[in-house]
Amino acid sequence: MGFDLTSIKKQSRDNHHPIVCLYGGEGVGKTSFAATAPNPIFLATEDGLVSVPGVDAFPIPTTFEDARTACSTLAKQDHDYKTLVIDTVDWLEPLIQREVAAQNKKDNIEDIGYGKGYVLAAEAFRKFMAGLDLLRKKKNMNIILLAHMTVKKYDSPDTDPYDRFGLKLNKHVNAIVMEACDCVLFANWRIQTTKADGGFNRKITKAIGDSERVLYTSHSPTHDAKNRYSMPDQIEMHWNALEEAIKEKK
């Protein structure tokens, strides 16, 4: 294809299939959210699918090669699946680390020394993400990476350090997820606070609200998040809401 004026095309998000990472705490509904995506197939690295019976799933991989084989199968064989769900990516990470340690004839990734093992594991994960991107393009599939959350200390150059929610991943793999995904979404309960009388002229802060769960789509001092679609800062925790938010800014 020549890179001349005839090769220019207007970009559109019609039929766009995103790579999404969704993370949150236990019981917030990460797996249930992924099950609302179009015709999903799960690659469950942990046994958490009992909450959404009836979904199709590969056997739980015991090695990183098992996970790669599952994704390769989807790329090579004919099927009707529209969404691949990795549930969860932080349980996939130890399989990568185990393979890297074995390749370097070590019992543990820490034994490689000087943090080199984690860099090698991140490179293996980067190649895995590149394979997921090829699967998305070849089979027109959505890709969803589910992950648990953790609280991390954030050292800002212009403020004192503070805690925030983030992905429960090694920093090298975390950076790849943040870079490669179209959306990194934080799932949490919608919480409001109010001041109450604590007696003795004291005011205490109480949490109020209902059981509504939302997806936070943008970076905040309280959590990591991003999206490439100029979404609202919060959307309903359902695939249809995400799809509509993507299409809205065509």
Image (spheres, rainbow, N blue to C red):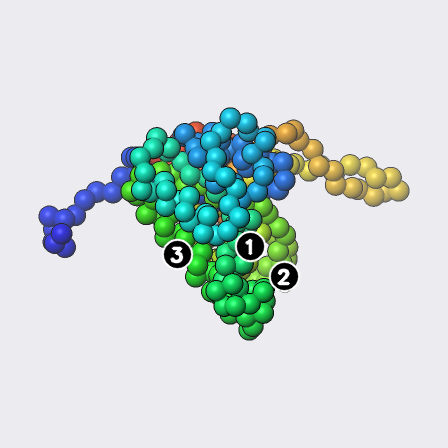
Q: Secondary structure at mark 1?
A: helix
Please give the residue where the numbered disc 1 appears in the rendered image. 94
Q: Position of residue 132 (x, y in %)?
A: 38, 47
Q: Position of residue 69 (x, y in %)?
A: 41, 47
What crowding class fits label 3: few (fewer than 14 Cα within 10 Å), some (14-19), or many (20 or more)? few
Q: Depth check: give the residue in front, 31 or 25.
A: 31
Q: Amino acid at mark 2?
A: Pro
Q: Amino acid at mark 1?
A: Pro
Q: Depth check: give the residue in front, 4 or 70.
A: 70
Comparing labels 2 and 3, the label whose residue is closer to the camera = 3
Residue 1 visible (yes or no): yes
Q: Residue, x 54% and y 35% (percent of image)?
A: 31
The relative height of residue 249 versus residue 166 in the rendered view (above or below) is above
- Distance from disc 2 to disc 1, alpha carbons, whole Å, reads 29 Å
Quarter of the image with the C terminus is top left
Q: Secondary structure at mark 3?
A: helix
Q: Earlier in the sequence, mark 1 or mark 3?
A: 1
Please give the residue where the numbered disc 3 appears in the rendered image. 127
Q: Is residue 6 left or right of residue 155?
A: left
Which residue is farthest right? 200
Q: Residue, x 48% and y 40% (percent of image)?
A: 43
Q: Earlier in the sequence, mark 2 or mark 3?
A: 3
The relative height of residue 181 versus residue 173 in the rendered view (above or below) is above
Q: Depth check: give the residue in front, 92 or 193.
A: 92
Q: Position of residue 68 (x, y in %)?
A: 42, 49
Q: Are marks 2 and 1 in contact (CB under 8 Å)?
A: no
Please give the residue where the numbered disc 2 appears in the rendered image. 161
Q: Depth check: give the residue in front, 94 or 29.
A: 94
Q: Earlier in the sequence, mark 2 or mark 1?
A: 1
Which residue is farthest top? 54
